[in-house]
Image (cartoon, rainbow, N blue to C red):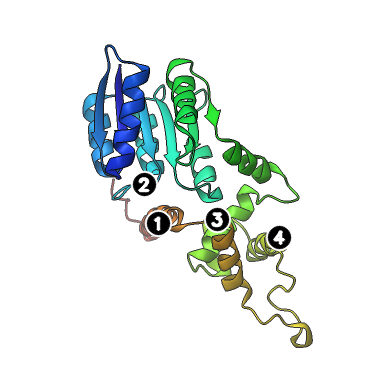
Amino acid sequence: MRVMIAEDDALHRAFARKIVERLWPDDIEVIEASSGDRAIDLATLESPLYVVLDLQLPTASGIEVARTIWGRRPDTHILFWSNFADEAYVRGVARIVPPGSVYGYVLKSASEDGMCAALRGVFHEGHCIIDREIRGIQHRTLDRREGITDCEYESLIDIALGLTDKAVADRRGLSTRGAQNRIQHLYEKLGLATAEGSAPNSASPFNSRTRAVYLALARGLINIDALRREQHHFDVWVGQAASARKRERRTQSGKAPKP
């Protein structure tokens, strides 16, 4: 049984190793990684079926590591281990779990017995084990009255990246009015009483876009890992859009597009 522990804090790494070796004292091999890039390299070389994965790793986040691991081997059992119950991390995990995969999400504040139960459930019994606090966040995201929908979350990411209404519309395949409507719905979910364009006599003291980003950060809807990841996705989209425009211009000018 090969287990990879990806954790940048040496004390936490030793703690996880101690519990894993106590639960499975025979026929176990533990490999360790202290960064996201190292975890990806080890997963590629060693193909561990069981992974304890910190979500806040240097060089590559736990979300990026898990996406890479599951992309190569979707039957890998992953226990996400984090100090934070941010909605950004909960959403990030939910968006990458392959159908039928076994995973867990436990907070580092859990007791030793709680960690043992999570490891046993995910690794040995093949159950999805989710910390009670994390489960509460999952339920909130599914509540259409309180939670942010995926479309509203996309709008939040776009305005946090600084995109204009037109850029949001282009990226999401919407009309400008459609993009503005989504952003307006996001404002309402965040409790912004005054949207952009309100009459001067009822104007909010806040810029709605900036205030929305602040409220999202305060609620843990977004964090720096999520924004870095989304900036990468946006850069990829920009490159693809530029290539598509070049091919279109070549076609219109009668030149065959390059492969």
Q: Which residue is mark 3?
A: 220
Q: Which residue is mark 4?
A: 185
- Nearest the camera: 152 or 226? 226
Q: Which residue is mark 1?
A: 228
Which amino acid does the dot numbered 1 rest on?
Answer: Arg
Among the 4 quarters of the image, the one containing residue 30: top left
Q: Which residue is mark 2?
A: 61
Which amino acid does the dot numbered 3 rest on?
Answer: Gly
Residue 97 seen in this snapshot: no
Question: Sequence order check: which comes first, mark 1 or mark 3?
Answer: 3
Q: Is residue 163 left or right of residue 5?
A: right
- Nearest the camera: 78 or 30? 30
In front of the other: label 1 or label 4? 1
Q: Position of residue 84 (x, y in %)?
A: 48, 48
In front of the other: label 2 or label 4? 2
Give the secondary structure at mark 3: loop
Residue sitting farthest toward the top: 26
Question: Sequence order check: which comes first, mark 1 or mark 4?
Answer: 4
| Above or below 129: residue 241 | below
CA neighbours of label 1 inside 10 A, class few (<14), some (14 to 19), many (20+) = few
Question: Sequence order check: which comes first, mark 3 or mark 2?
Answer: 2
Give the secondary structure at mark 4: helix
| Above or below 111: residue 199 | below
Which amino acid does the dot numbered 4 rest on?
Answer: His
Residue pictured at 49% horizontal, 69% vertical: 162
CA neighbours of label 4 inside 10 A, class few (<14), some (14 to 19), many (20+) = some
- Image quarter of the C terminus: top left
Q: Position of residue 154 (x, y in %)?
A: 56, 54
Question: Sequence order check: which comes first, mark 1 or mark 2?
Answer: 2
